[in-house]
Amino acid sequence: MIVRTLLLTLVTTTAIAQAPPAPAPAQATRCTTSAHRQFDFWIGLWAVTDAEGHFAGVNRIEPRNGGCVLHEHWMSARGGYSGTSLNWLGADQRWHQSWVDSMGQALQLTGGLAGGSMVMEGAPKQRITWTPIDRDTVRQRWEMSANEGKSWTVAFDGLYHRVADPPAPAAAEGSLLARLAGDWIGEGDVMGKRVAVMLHVGPVLAGRFTELRWLNLGGGAAHTRFEGRAVYALESPGHYRATWWDSEGSEHPIMASEQGDATLEALWGEAGRTRYTLLPGGEIEVIDSTKHKDGNWVEFGRSHLTRSLE
């Protein structure tokens, strides 16, 4: 998960706009009750089949915004059709779903748990029931009524089959690289310019590698965008190799190693270095440097990032 190099060609920025204040910690952790976890059985990547066992599509359901929302992304097996929904527990202690698809159709549903199933209804008269069969199988039954609920017609009856989690993590559990995994956001100073920064670190390719994605947003009249990606491979405990590519057309190898239990040092190109340090408060400090001819490292960028709830 070694970070990218904020290259010397990178930034042509001035001060970025003042961001709104971060929410209080109580707001960031409020969706932690057992009621908020009632629909967690739907979380995952699923291959969906219809009542005849034919492949119907792929659905990905992910927790967002600190676990306050479940984000659904549906892709039809036939192509040309997709849809997304947001699902959340409201202040009324009922579950709500807002759905919109690639045909511009929208659906609003409300409901809750009933006999172990999540059941939501909406107008025009629609009812969707999600029933966990076991940990890796969920049944979804979508029904419609033309007579105010006196009788129902099945529009879709399918099974969700969980796609297995990656079998082999790229970094050992508990390692610094594993602890840095996730989404991060913050700001920094690069060559005297204030910039907004975003970082994502996570497993890819069946968990055998770790991808690092860096996004740099500069200030000024026209905000400059710089992004890069690197894919890291574990060579031995605490040691990684990677290749970096960015939007400036740069490509270079990276050799990285964990320095103690809090700092990951990435050496890039012929004379570049990025250090990621996990601070006691849970933030990441990222320092970029280049080596001058005299052998000394000279810092040209420093950023501080905190975990994003996304």
Image: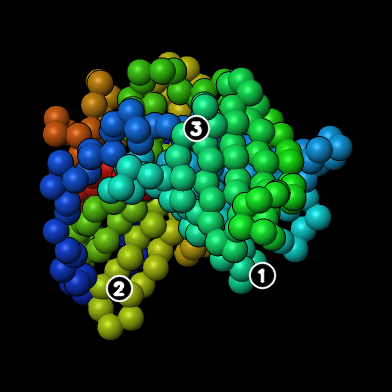
Q: CA distance from mark 3 to mark 2?
A: 57 Å
Q: Earlier in the sequence, mark 1 or mark 2?
A: 2
The amino acid marked with disc number 3 is Ala
Mark 3 lies on a secondary structure that is: strand
Could you say which is closer to the camera, residue 97 or residue 122?
122
Name the residue carrying label 3: 114
Q: Are marks 1 and 3 in contact (CB under 8 Å)?
A: no
Mark 1 lies on a secondary structure that is: loop
Look at the picture and state if 4 lies above or below 80: above
Q: Earlier in the sequence, mark 3 or mark 2?
A: 2
Name the residue carrying label 2: 12
Name the residue carrying label 1: 103
Residue 80: quarter of image: bottom right
Residue 10: quarter of image: bottom left
Q: Earlier in the sequence, mark 1 or mark 3?
A: 1
Q: How many labels sit on residues?
A: 3
